[in-house]
Image (cartoon, helix red, strand yellow):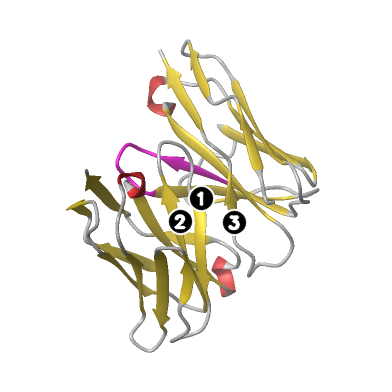
Amino acid sequence: GAVVSQHPSWVICKSGTSVKIECRSLDFQATTMFWYRQFPKQSLMLMATSNEGSKATYEQGVEKDKFLINHASLTLSTLTVTSAHPEDSSFYICSARAGQVNQPQHFGDGTRLSIL
Amino acid sequence: EDKVVQSPLSLVVHEGDTVTLNCSYEVTNFRSLLWYKQEKKAPTFLFMLTSSGIEKKSGRLSSILDKKELFSILNITATQTGDSAIYLCATNAGGTSYGKLTFGQGTILTVHP
């Protein structure tokens, strides 16, 4: 149980393109989903917390107009990187948590984004 | 600001060795500590610890939490090449950090045949 699917797994696109990444909880309802960014050989950095039906809460230093998050249902959250530039190239990972805050987060397989 | 520190940052061992990974934390409103294993993709959940002194065990992996000294250890016995991965420790806190995970830097474990 507790499977999180993330799509696509790899994206290569030109500078200026907007890229949408989907995160789905397959066998549970996720009231809260999280979006992380990970640079090579570094740990996960939380970008934003997404609660179903409400606006995402962004961490300090993360541009909300650059990284648009939508959590329209209990099983789907999307992250759109708008007008992507090479510095946005990174590994983006989502996680989902079912119910209470003391439940573990389960992670998707991540999306490797490369902007040329 | 909440802080999670893991040591060592990297470790190279041979198959059959036993390893101990460390995680210390300074967290306001601590709720739980979690261990994850990350191979090529995203982290997979190993353990969640909320109480001191109670060992959690899964096969060759075990973990324990000390809330007085603010640390946790992850033990792997009889290591195998498939144990090679980044092991991440994270804390789950309440208050203004409610529900968010704060991750340590990770320990890169390499197991040679």
Parent chain of label 3: A
Same subunit: marks 2 and 1: yes
- How crowded pointer 1 is (Cα within 10 Å; few <14, some 14-19, many 20+) is rated as some
Percent position (x, y) of residue B39? 40, 42
Proximity of marks 2 and 1: CB atoms separated by less than 8 Å: yes
- How crowded pointer 3 is (Cα within 10 Å; few <14, some 14-19, many 20+) is rated as many
- How crowded pointer 2 is (Cα within 10 Å; few <14, some 14-19, many 20+) is rated as many
Residue located at (81% from left, 48% from top): A53
Which label belongs to residue B36? 2
Q: Which residue is mark 1?
A: B44
Magenta region: which residues? A35-43
Percent position (x, y) of residue B14? 19, 51
| Amino acid found under the numbered disc labelled 3 | Gln
Q: Give the answer, above or below, for where A65 lies relative to A99.
A: above
Percent position (x, y) of residue B1? 40, 68
**B24 left or right of B7?**
right
Q: Which residue is mark 3?
A: A105
